Image (tube, rainbow, N blue to C red):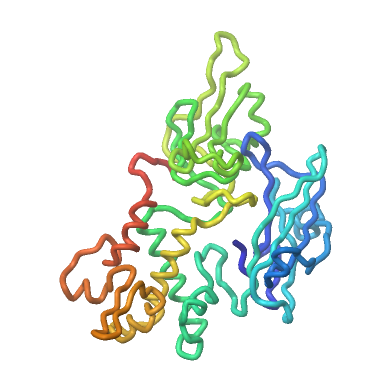
Amino acid sequence: MVYMARTQSSTASKPLLSFIHQNTYGYLADVEALSYAVFDLTTPANELSPVAKVAKTAVNLDAAPAGRRLGTGYYYAPLTIGADWTLGLYKVVWYYDTGVGEVEMTTALTVTSADHGPPDYYVSVQDLYDTGLDPDEFSVAAVRAAIKRASELIDRATGRHFAPVHKTLIVDGRGGPKLRLREPIIAVEYVSPFDEYIELSDLSQYSSGYIVYNRHIRLGMKAPDDRNNPKIELGYASRPFGARNRFPDGSQDTRVKGVFGYTEPDGSPYGKTPDEIVYVAKLIALLYSTPAASDEAWFKKNTWKVTGERTRDQEVRYNGVNPLLAKAAGVAGFITGDDEIDSILLAYRVSPGMTGA
């Protein structure tokens, strides 16, 4: 999900609306043509028959700043959200051609009234207001700060990041044909295992085959789940005796540049933040949204979680444990003291066997 506020722009320095293309082997590759269009889905009628908000527009494939290319197979759309755009859900359709005909790919876009913050926050300010927080009592700045703390807590508790990030990993080679990473792979641009820049498209000179383990994105396959075993594997070389290529054996001797993050396949270039993580981020941000450690504040923020009421004796049942009451009772929780939150965080915690950057 992409969030953009009214009057906000996607630019080279802040590519809020971006596109990546990877080939069938899992590495980033340039396209020959790229366009995008935006469709309004903010009403039930529009959901059934989407209305074009931005007509199909060609993307300049030259390198930024003259064009919109930010790296191999990595582009952005210079979209600006108008001040009069209706708040809600839109659909961005990317049209790309690699030389074999035009293909479409879709990205969800939500237009909000307030700046969402960095694109790797897991919920928006509007999401929290929609749960019942009063904007007059909870300012945009306070809610955004709560979302930041919630997103950071989730990352620390799980050892993962649940949004796509373009970056370079520095990893340890193990002297074998497999390079194991700590972070799930969305796409790879290059690997430099021999103190030199080697694009994966050039590895054919070393190997007759290689595999990037990101099949959850490329193929929508989650069994086996490559997110729990991210790696790049070199194949057999065209050499005498079938000698096998190997990565170096050493400490922090191999660089891998690409896009990484634990996302769910949804047909978009990057995948999406898992729904359970979005839900937990919302719960934690609600707990953080006010500093008042009182039952009154807790009940005010959690009325939307009510699962049952009994008006005669005033009994109210909540989905989850009141962390303030749990703390007062001396109940130890995994992270927050809320059984529901902690059980989800534990389910997404990184496997002890994963190694790498």
Q: Is residue 100 left or right of residue 159?
A: right
Q: Residue at x 25, y 76 (%)?
A: 324
Q: Residue furthest left?
A: 330
Nearer to me, 2 or 320: 320
- Relative to 190, does residue 125 appear above or below in the rendering? below
- Relative to 36, does residue 221 appear above or below in the rendering? above
Q: Residue furthest top?
A: 241
Q: Is residue 346 left or right of residue 9?
A: left
Q: Is residue 292 visible?
A: yes
Q: Residue at x 31, y 68 (%)?
A: 320
- Relative to 120, does residue 139 appear above or below in the rendering? below
Q: Residue at x 33, y 43 (%)?
A: 352
Q: Is residue 253 visible?
A: no
- Quadrant in the rendering for residue 203: top right
Q: Residue at x 68, y 58 (%)?
A: 18
Q: Is residue 62 left or right of residue 212?
A: right
Nearer to me, 13 or 331: 331
Residue 112 is situated, as x and y percent measured from the top left of the image, at 62, 75
Residue 42 is situated, as x and y percent measured from the top left of the image, at 68, 71
- Quadrant in the rendering for residue 309: bottom left
- Quadrant in the rendering for residue 221: top right
Q: Residue furthest front?
A: 312
Residue 20 is situated, as x and y percent measured from the top left of the image, at 67, 50
Image quarter of the C terminus: top left
Image quarter of the N terminus: bottom right
